[in-house]
Structure formats: structure tokens, C-alpha cells
Image (cartoon, rainbow, N blue to C red):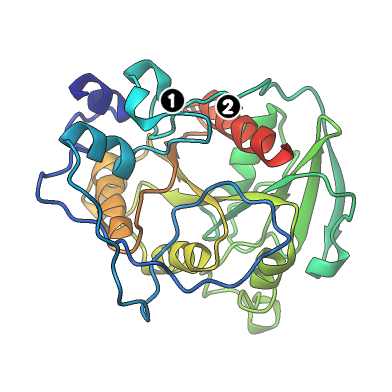
Amino acid sequence: MLLLRNRLLPSPSLLLLPKSTSFPLSIPTCLSHSTRRQYPTQNATSASASKTTQTPPISDAARFVRTVLFVPPGVDPDEVTDDMVLPGSNIVVGPYTGDSRIKEVEFVKSSGRAKDCPKDDRPEFAILGRSNVGKSSLINALVRKKEVALTSKKPGKTQLINHFLVNKSWYIVDLPGYGFAKAPDASRMDWSSFTKGYFLNRDTLVAVLLLIDASVPPQKIDLDCANWLGRNNIPLTFVFTKCDKMKASKGKRPDENIKLFQQLIRQNYREHPPWIMTSSVTGLGRDELLLHMSQLRNYWDQ
């Protein structure tokens, strides 16, 4: 189990949990999505939930697997081994992992409203994060083509819901970034009514890839977004970007920022959601993220 912990991140101490660590077990008050075919999620706890569920004592190894790793359907937590965990992540590979190669990609349409998005029932992954976190760069890295999604040094460039069809069978969806305060009032996106409407009404959504800038300390707006998704039963995967960059003015290394973000997430999550480290410059985590997406997609199709 120690070897398994050491493989999760370059820093062996980054994800070790103290034996006294406790995790909230409150059942959240969530919106109903009776028609949504969901992958099992680690929901954020509701502030209004007060009752807790008592669980019998378990071993340190079992606690580590169940509270730190993302164990997919079809995998017995007691049988997880170190070679089943994707490098640079907490994601366990299970029987639903299939062909993750991207053979072709095409831009389909931009939509100003959720109800205008494609209605062909293909599964989709939404790319979400703060403006300038690297959403377009990640999309281009995943599909291995330049300028499939346009990148810009000016935050707030994406203003619509953009659908990209992959292998003629599933979508990558580029959503407007949030948290860019310098945009003109007329062009700012009302995240509450625009993007949230997409999440709450999109039955074909497999998961949200929530991008987190690892080169800066945790941002409240990212934590708020993650907790809102969890409370509403919307599956998500944390994708830590810019893991090879360090901003001297911020004072901390990317691995330290990631560790702190994970600690804050555990305060509101019963189990830790899946996460993976990426860098569009070095290609770090690209193949692992595609394997994870393949696993989610194949299970969603069942």
C-alpha cells in the first residue's frame, strides 16, 4: 500500500493521510436527475444535512483506498493494487476501460443556450474552469491537433457552448470560463443562468472536467464551483493544469498547491473525486486522462 501511495504523485508525501483524518459522511440534499445516467459520484455535503452514517472500523489500507482513490464500478476496493492506478492521479483502472484513441475530431456548433445544444444523445464531457486556466490548450492536447479550440492570452475568449464531435461517437464541450472580472459588463457571462442551466438539463453529460490551475494557491471560486457540482449530483474530475509551472510571486510549488486544494475538498466531500495532473506543454497526463474518459464513457453506455 505504501508503494501505491508513492505512485499517486511525484511527491511521496503529497497525498498521505494522517490516521486521525475524518471524512464527512452526511447525505447531501441534491437536485433530482431521474433521467440522467450517472457515473458514481463523490457528492459534496449539504450545509443543511446534519445526520451522519456510522460505519464499522476498517483497516488503514482499506480507508486509503475508499477515501483517496476513485474506484470505478466492477472493481473490488479490497483487490486494488498499485499497477491499477493511473500515474499522476487517484484513478483506478477497471473493466470498463476501452479504446481511448482519438482518430478524428470536428467542430459541430456553438450554442448560446443549453436548449440549442445538439440533441443526438451522444455522451459528452464538459471542460470547465476559470478563464485562462488552459481549457482550449487541454482540448488541443487531447485531440493532438493545433487550434481545434482557439487559444488566447486574453481571458474570457470563449463566450458560447462549443461542441466538438470525437470519433463520430462522443463530444468534448468547451464552456465559457468563469471568474474573469476585467471583462466588459456587456460581455460577462452570467454563470448562474447560462452554464448552470447546461449542467442541470443535459442528460447526455457524462462528467465535467473541472480544470484547476496548479501554479497558484487554491481559489475560492474553484472550490465553490466544485461544491456546487457535487451538491447537484453532477459527476466531475479535477484536472490540475500547469503542473510544470511555478509563479515565483505566489510562493508555492504546484504540488504544494494541489495538496492544499485536495485538503480543502475533503472538508466537503464524503469521498475524494477523481483527479489527474496534466500539462499541455509536456503532454503530462494526456493518455491517462483519455483512459479515464473512456472508462466513464463505456460505463455510461451500459
Please give the residue where the numbered disc 1 appears in the rendered image: 86
* Relative image position of residue 9 (x, y in whole percent): 30, 30
Front residue of 119 and 245: 119
Is residue 244 shown above or below 116?
above
Residue type at numbered disc 1: Leu
Is residue 95 shown above or below 62?
above
* Relative image position of residue 35 (x, y in whole percent): 73, 60
Q: Is residue 112 visible?
A: no
Residue type at numbered disc 2: Leu
Left or right: where does residue 19 sit relative to residue 23?
left
The quarter in which the C terminus is drawn is top right
Q: Measure the alpha-carbon separation of dots 1 and 2.
A: 9 Å
* Relative image position of residue 28 (x, y in whole percent): 43, 69
Q: Are marks 1 and 2 in contact (CB under 8 Å)?
A: yes
Q: Residue furthest top?
A: 83
* Relative image position of residue 54 (x, y in whole percent): 25, 59
Front residue of 237 and 215: 237
Q: Which residue is at a point 31% across and 61% down the rendered structure image?
A: 25
Of the numbered discs 1 and 2, the one sitting upstream in the chain is: 1
Q: Residues within 10 Å of mark 1 (few under 14, many from 20)?
A: many
The quarter in which the N terminus is drawn is top left
Please give the residue where the numbered disc 2 appears in the rendered image: 291
